[in-house]
Image (cartoon, helix red, strand yellow):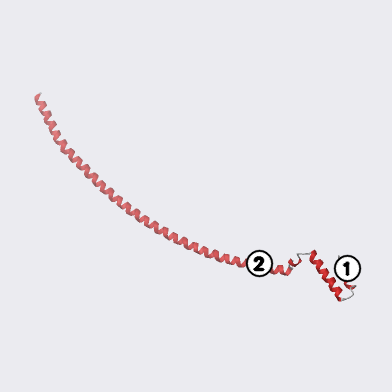
Amino acid sequence: MGSVVELYEALASAPDERARARLIAAAFERLEERYPHLPDLVTHQQLRETEVRLQKEIEQVRADLSLQIERLRGEVKTEIEQLRAEVKTDIAQLRGELRETELRLQKEIEQLRGEVTTAIEHSRNTLLMWIIPLMFAQVGALAALVKLL
């Protein structure tokens, strides 16, 4: 039996119900042999239901991702603010240390200036202490030399 018309004619000419049932069973068997993937086929309605279900799942995943993104943004903002506060604190601390160092260096510079000034005055006084008697000695030596001549 190759066509539906032949199946109809065989069913119409079948002598009893048993022969008709056998013809129908044989037709189904040939149909299954010819189309072995037939049980795996889906209807348009099943396909549409699957599509709608997948769309709902996709929307749920999008919503979940949006919530996670917003949560992560909040966490990142919080961490950034904490880091900013820490950096500001560190900068303020470093500025204070820099001011302390600057003041300490200024004091040391003033101390060194005082020491250098004192050393210069001491050297000047020492030089004067030697130069004045030497000048008098020179004047005396010149006067003695002039007298001898």
**Which of 31/46 is in front?**
31
Q: Which residue matches tag 1?
A: 6
The answer to whether residue 26 is left or right of residue 41 is right
In primary-sequence order, the first of circles 1 and 2 is 1
- Residue at 32% in and 52% down: 101
- Check disc 1 and give the amino acid type: Glu
Q: Quadrant of residue 28?
A: bottom right
Residue 10: where, in percent of width, then height?
88, 70
- Check disc 2 and give the amino acid type: Leu
Q: Are marks 1 and 2 in contact (CB under 8 Å)?
A: no
**Which of 90/13 is in front?**
13
The answer to whether residue 99 is left or right of residue 75 is left
For the residue labelled by badge 2, is the local secondary structure a helix, a strand or a loop?
helix
Image mark for residue 108: none
The answer to whether residue 41 is left or right of residue 134 is right
Residue ranking furthest to the left: 147
